[in-house]
Image (tube, helix red, strand yellow):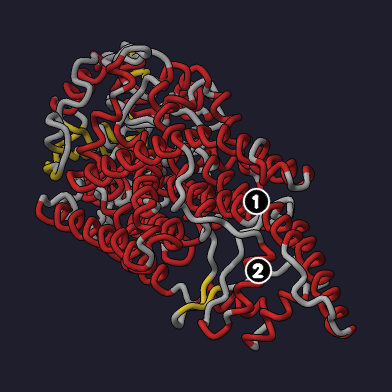
Amino acid sequence: MMQSPAAASLQSRHGVPDGLGVLLAFQRQWPAYCLGLCVGVAYFFSSPVAGDFWWFDASRHAMNSVFVHDVFAQGGWKDPIRFAKAYYDQYPGINIGFYPPFLYLVTAPFLGVFGVSHATCQAVVSGFAALCAMAGYAWTRPVLGRLGACAAGAMLVVVPEMALWGRQVQLDVPAVALLLWGVWALVKWLAWPRDRWLWLAALLLGCAMLTRVQTLFVWPLWLAAVGLHPVARAQRWRLRLGATALYGLLSLPSVAAALYFAKVMGSLAGKMPDMPDRWSWANWGWYAARMPDQLGFVGTAVLLLGLLLLIEQGARAARGRGADDPVELPADQAIEQSLQQPAQGTLRRPVHRPLGRPNERLLEQTNKQPNKQPNKQPDQQRNEQRNEQRNEQFNGQLNEQHAERPMQRSAGRNELLPMAGPGARRLALWMALSTALLAWLFFSLVSNKEPRFALPVLPFAMLAALLAIASQPTAVRLGALGRMWPRVLAMLMAAGMGAEAWTTQRWADVPRVAGHRDAALLAAQWAAPNSRVMISAHRDGNFIFALRAWGQRPDLAVRRADKLLVDMTIMRQLGIQDRGLNDDDIRRLLVRERVSVVVAQSGYLGDQPSMQALDRLLDADCCFELRQTLRIDGQHRADETALRVYVRRAIPPIPTSLTNPANETNQTNQTSPANPANQTNQTNQTNQTNQTTP
């Protein structure tokens, strides 16, 4: 590749190749790596890791990862449809068809290395939380410095809502991490157009769609940035089209799944019970009213301060550009000034214009200047002409994106400046703010609401507030002193958020629910060989995951009472129908299914006649005997009190008509992932309130 004289001069001055310099620059970002390591370790060691899942979907996501692992470990990839049917028949706790698979694909290799466990699944989510903190560092490093950026990254993951869902095996925090880095790469491309940044942005945002389909709200931002921004329009259309195609290709599976479950998705996005009307003030202020609890007192104060500064900056911009605002230099002049001041030890990256337009004012002033040296030597004239040709060549290379990137060296630092110019800082601010507003708009339109759904709003809103604080014109005019106060303020705010989390016990008090793992181990100990275990509990996913994670009874299969005795679509609010089975019907059903152990939660779905008949049969002491009662501990619902473990007295012989595989398949209401009619019934725990994504 052809190299410009200016780039060669930069390389020769520092004695290292430019590619090696870039590698060293990344290696010297040790504060970001230390921050990520500290956050990941803190998240992991404060999380539930012993099968005590708190949120209803957490065990489902962990089980989906185990399913992907078993597909490859047990040879299921040879016949995936058949394997999926058999797997669901044994462990009816997966819903991988309903959720995008990216997190499961990432977790499966770790399960293969470290073993199938709750701790392994949680470690992967903790790693994504560390990426969130490192993304906060990358966004704010150019304006807050190393310590200030570390404080900003810590603030993103200390907020109560992020700390809660980052310590559950959920899709929310991994999706937020991918969004933060994807939008950062898009800003990076707009600030310094290089092909790799656009491809990276498309890859990361596409993976975010493969993690949570609700990240669809980023698509308008992508189309506006890639199709309408002046910098983007100056780039090759094939590049922009190719990156958009990659983004769309990665988004396609999630969109296809959403269309497949359109009936259920439509019910969740439409009018939900106990939710405000879509066009009411209560609906549009629903998430805003919960932000103080999600962010905490200090986080809310940071957000309000940033909002006030944004309003002030907007009013100031409406009045016109101030005389004290920083002026961006064209690329040639910035490089010339950098080369003329080597003694200061600083090589600043120029902020160039994408189209390479010359600075007309500078050229006009240059032409008006009198020629102070009319009698120049021939050698001097040739040198000046040669320098002009080199400058033109270098500008052309900048526009074609073939020049290697200069580095900054300042006070012993060697690092890349992704968004160092004032224009790039404003771009980062408005991109973060736009992402937060798009997320808020999208989740406000969806009727099914939970505070965690709008989790992407929080980090982008916090970043916009921090960038607004750091970009105050007063700080710019005060020079080094002005640059210090936003950094000190960021560190003080991070310390305040940490102190608030510690004093209010919101960091240490992580919700968990225990008891189901012990019930699964007892059932595995007492179950007859090649028999089945029935679970009738609100958190049956905890039980199923614990049985598979233990892994010592592969001959056992699980049957769910809320699939055999009632018909329910995802959650009770969307409809539940009893199957009308009496005591004799349930007795024959348990014989046909070869159920040797029943684990029942006291009073689960107690208003359904079939579930009442099951309780009567178990209490009659005719077929099953109560072996042990386990208390359910943790932050659970009021009706979750205990798990009763029943063991069959003797398994009677099964009639020949009932052992026919065809009859057993037809009479068993356990659905497989390949059955589209009943796929939605397996997605979440029964009688769950607003536990499903919108």
At which x and y percent is residue 309? 33, 42
Q: Closer to the N terminus: mark 2 or mark 1?
A: 1
Q: Which mark is residue 405?
A: 2
Amino acid under disc 2: Arg
Bin the neighbour count of mark 1 within 10 Å (Cα to Cα): few under 14, some 14-19, many 20 and up: many
Q: Tell which of 536 and 634 is nearer to you.
A: 634
* Residue tagged 1: 198
Q: Quadrant of residue 446?
A: top left
Tag in front: 2 or 1: 2
Q: Is residue 332 above or below residue 249?
A: below
Q: Tell which of 692 and 488 is nearer to you.
A: 488
Q: Residue at x 62, y 53 (%)?
A: 189
Q: Residue at x 74, y 66 (%)?
A: 370
> On the rendered structure, is 620 left or right of 483?
left
At which x and y percent is residue 238? 79, 44
**Residue 86 visible to the viewer:** yes
